[in-house]
Amino acid sequence: MRPLVVVNVAMSADGKISTRERRQVRISGAIDRARVDRLKAESDAIMVGIGTVLADNPSLTVKSSELREQRVKKGLEENPIRIVVDSLARTPPDADILHKGRGSRIIAISDKADSKAVKALTRHAEVIRAGSEEVDLRELLEKLGDRRIHCLMVEGGGRLIGALFRTHLVDELYTYVGNIVIGGDGSPTPSDGPGFLREEEFVHLHLVETSSLEEGVLIHWRVEKK
C-alpha cells in the first residue's frame, strides 16, 4: 500500500516558485518555515526531485532541535527518510542531502542510470530502481509503502509535483501564497511538465482550510478522488 502523499509548496502571488534561472527565492517567513518544519518532523519521509537537489542543494533536515528530540523519543531517527527522484543518478556524491544530519537516504533511479554513478551513490544511500526510461512514481511509492513509509511529504520541484498529479498520486496539498510577484514566462510553477490537455483530466481539489499567515495566505487542499 502506497504512502499518503502530502505536497507542500510556497509560491508567489503570480504562481511562481522561483525565477526563470531556477534561483531559490525566499517566499515565506519564519512562521511558515516553522510550520513546514513541523510537517517535515511529522512525516516518515520527505521527497524531492533531482532538479531541486542540483539547484538548491537542500539538506531536508528537521531544523528544530525540539522536534528532532520528539522524534527520537518516539523511537524514530532525528530526520525523516530523505528521498531523491533521480532517474539518471545525477545526484552529486557530495550533496548536502547525503551528508548533513542523521537519518536514512534513498535515491530512486531508472534502468537508464549510469552504473558508475549508481555505485558511487550506494556509499551514501539506499538505491531503489523503479522504471525503465525514468522513475515510475507509482512503482516507487509501492516500494516505499513496503518499507513502512506511511506519510510522504513532497517539497519539489515543479516537475516532480506535476508528475505526481498526472499519475493521481497526491492526497493533500498545502500552498503558501506569498506577497511577491516574480514573473517570467520560463519561471517554474508548483506543477510543471506537460500538464493536462482536456478538462476531464484536471485534478479537482476540496478546500479544507485557509488562513492568513504573515503577509501571505496558507491554503490546505485535499485531492478529490475519482
Image (spheres, helix red, strand yellow):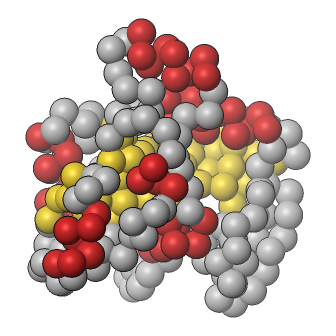
Q: Is residue 208 left or right of residue 125?
A: right
Q: Residue at x 84, y 70 (%)?
A: 181
Q: Residue furthest top?
A: 73
Quarter of the rendering occupied by the N terminus: top left
Q: Give the answer, above or below, for where 56 lies relative to 99.
A: below
**Residue 119 horizontal side relative to residue 162, left or right:** left
| Quarter holding residue 36 | top right
Vertical placement of residue 154 versus 15, above or below: above
Judge whether residue 173 can be spotted in this image.
no
In x, y percent, where is residue 175?
A: 62, 51
Q: In the figure, is residue 9 to the left or right of 12?
A: left
Question: On the image, which quarter does residue 23 sit in?
Answer: bottom right
Residue 70 horizontal/vertical position (percent) = 49, 14
Picture mark count: 0
- Asked whether residue 21 appears in the rendered view, the answer is yes
| Relative image position of residue 166 (x, y in whole percent) | 33, 70
Figure check: 21 above or below 140: below
Q: Which residue is drawn at 56% across and 56% down?
A: 58
The image shows residue 218 at horizontal and vertical percentages of 69, 43
Farthest-out residue, bottom:
185
Q: Quadrant of the C terminus?
A: bottom left
Question: Looking at the image, which residue is at 28% across and 63% down?
Answer: 121
Quadrant of residue 67 within the rendered picture: top right
Q: Is residue 164 above or below residue 74?
A: below
Residue in the picture at 14% in, 50% down: 142
Would residue 126 appear left or right of 171 to someone viewing this image?
Answer: left
